[in-house]
Structure formats: C-alpha cells, structure tokens
Amino acid sequence: WSVGAAFASSESAATASALPAALAGALVLMGAVSVLGLARSLPVRLAAGVVCALVLSFGFRQIILPGAHGLFPSSEAAQALRANGLAARPLWVLGYRETSLVFLTRTDAHLTYAEDVAAHAAAGDAVVVSQDKLPALQELLRPRGLLFAQGGNAGEVHGLNLGNGRKVTLYVGVLAPN
C-alpha cells in the first residue's frame, strides 16, 4: 500500500496502448469494405458480407475491446479491488456515482460522500474515490486517525465516465490508521 495517492497521470500510457488497437480496428474495417467492393454477384456479396462481419466481430472483441480499458472504469476499479484483496471488505465509493460498479462488486456498496465515509467507515474498509474528492476525504479522515492508502496493484484507474461523458481518475485502496 502506498500512503496517500499519486496524482501523476498515466494518460500517455493509455493513449499509447489504445493506438495499436485503433490501427488494428481500422485495418479490419478497410479489409471488410474492400472485400465488399470487389464482389460482383449478390450471393457472393452476401457471403462476403457474412465473412466480413465475422472478421470484424472477432477483431472488435479480440483486438479492440481488450485495448480499450479506458471505456470501462467500473470494471477496472472492480478488478483493482480484487487484485488488492479488497473485494470482501465493506466498500465505500466517493465521487463516482455509476451503479455499474455496484453490480460488478456487491449490492451493499455505499455510494456516498466524504463526510459519510469519515463518520462511519472503519480501518480496513475498501474505498474507491475520484481524484477530485480525495483531498477532502483525507482531510476529513485525519481527526479520526485514519487515512486513505492507495492499493499497489492497479490502484489508479483512468477512464471515461460514460454516464456524463467526462474523463475520470479513480483511486482504489483501503482506510488505514494514520
């Protein structure tokens, strides 16, 4: 566990991994369009369309989606909870109101505010907190002798909040004694 949270951005790493996926997707799409353009008769065009759809589907599922981590921050946060051994602990979520995280973890997760966490959470509880809410959380936890300790395994998640279309940075960790 690293005490506190690092605010360094890893967007360049996310962009670098997304570029090969985008190029692979473009190549698959260009191949599909060229095959359909070369076919002359209707049965050949239909067969080519089916083959192209299968290739595009495979390419999308096997090449593009695995490289598009930033589209699923809830999934990555849930994976980070599991990677850090926090999946079975009480879960507090601050600044990220996507119910998909609840469905990916458990239904007793608390989607709440920093004041609620500071008043009711205990040392050892798991926390997913957005970057903009972290300073307030740390400040409110200090009088109780607690602090947020970021998980060492994928404890920082960058992505696109599909609910509001904004970029989001989430920190996954645990409440620890100060």
Image: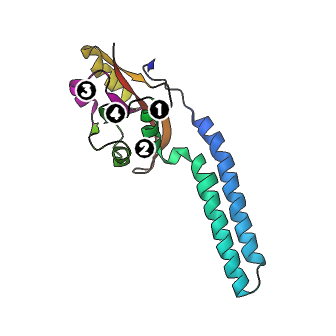
Q: Is residue 145 magenta?
A: no
Q: Position of residue 52 (x, y in %)?
A: 68, 70
Which residue in the protein does label 4 denote?
88
Q: Secondary structure at mark 4?
A: loop
Q: Position of residue 87 (x, y in %)?
A: 37, 34
- Quadrant the N terminus occupies: top left
Circle number at residue 121:
3
Numbered label attached to residue 83: 1
Q: Earlier in the sequence, mark 3 or mark 1?
A: 1
Label 4 or label 2, whichever lies nearer to me, is 4
Q: Which residue is mark 2?
A: 74
Q: Which span of residues is magenta-colored?
A: 112-131
The Cα atoms of the two marked residues, 1 and 4, are separated by 12 Å
Q: CA distance from mark 4 to mark 2?
A: 17 Å
For label 2, the SS is helix
What residue do we see at 45% from left, 26% from top?
151
Label 3 to label 1: alpha-carbon separation = 21 Å
* Amino acid found under the numbered disc labelled 1: Ala
| Image coloring type | rainbow
